[in-house]
């Protein structure tokens, strides 16, 4: 009886681990998306340093999703521009251009036209 009880517990634990690990990527994406939205909100509120912190996390969490990464990099560049962080801004623009060359993800990014226009203005100043 004891062996059957132990094997039943092992089966339940195995199933729980399988469920938790199968949902892990979705939870990571949700976390990154939440950081992205929080960064956007901070940017709109002109809390640029808070936006930068959130958007760096969002970008890192979106490395395997080029459209989301592109979106995070756009917002990060805008926040860095707003904060007057020229060197960081240039590094973000360079990273954005690298992602765009490799994946062409910018057109698929969920960005409003005014956000795209603001980012394109930054690009025109930064890219020869």
Image (cartoon, rainbow, N blue to C red):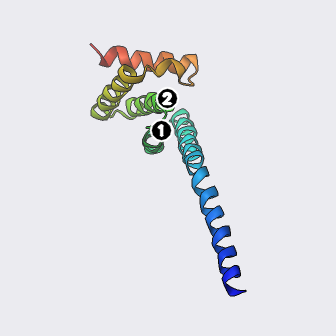
How far apart are the two marked residues, 1 and 2, measured between alpha carbons? 9 Å
Under circle 1, the secondary element is loop
At x 30%, y 31%, the residue is 91
Position of the C terminus by quadrant? top left
The disc placed on residue 36 is none
Tell me the residue that label 2 is attached to.
71
Tell me the residue that label 1 is attached to.
62
Q: Confirm or deny contact between disc 1 and disc 2 (CB under 8 A).
A: yes
Q: Quadrant of residue 49?
A: top left
Q: Residue furthest bottom?
A: 2
At x 36%, y 20%, the residue is 101
Viewer-closest of 65 and 33: 65
Classify 45 as above or below 3. above
Q: Quadrant of residue 81?
A: top left
At x 44%, y 38%, the residue is 59
Percent x, y of residue 42: 53, 39
């Amino acid at each position: 009886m004891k062996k059957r009880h132990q094997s039943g517990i092992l089966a339940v634990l195995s199933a729980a681990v399988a469920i938790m690990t199968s949902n892990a990527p979705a939870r990571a994406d949700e976390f990154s998306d939440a950081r992205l939205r929080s960064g956007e909100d901070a940017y709109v509120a002109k809390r640029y340093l808070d936006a930068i912190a959130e958007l760096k996390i969002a970008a890192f969490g979106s490395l395997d999703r080029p459209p989301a990464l592109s979106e995070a990099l756009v917002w990060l560049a805008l926040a860095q521009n707003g904060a007057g962080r020229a060197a960081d801004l240039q590094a973000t623009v360079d990273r954005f251009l690298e992602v765009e060359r490799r994946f062409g993800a910018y057109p698929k990014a969920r960005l409003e036209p005014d956000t795209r226009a603001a980012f394109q203005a930054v690009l025109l100043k930064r890219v020869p």
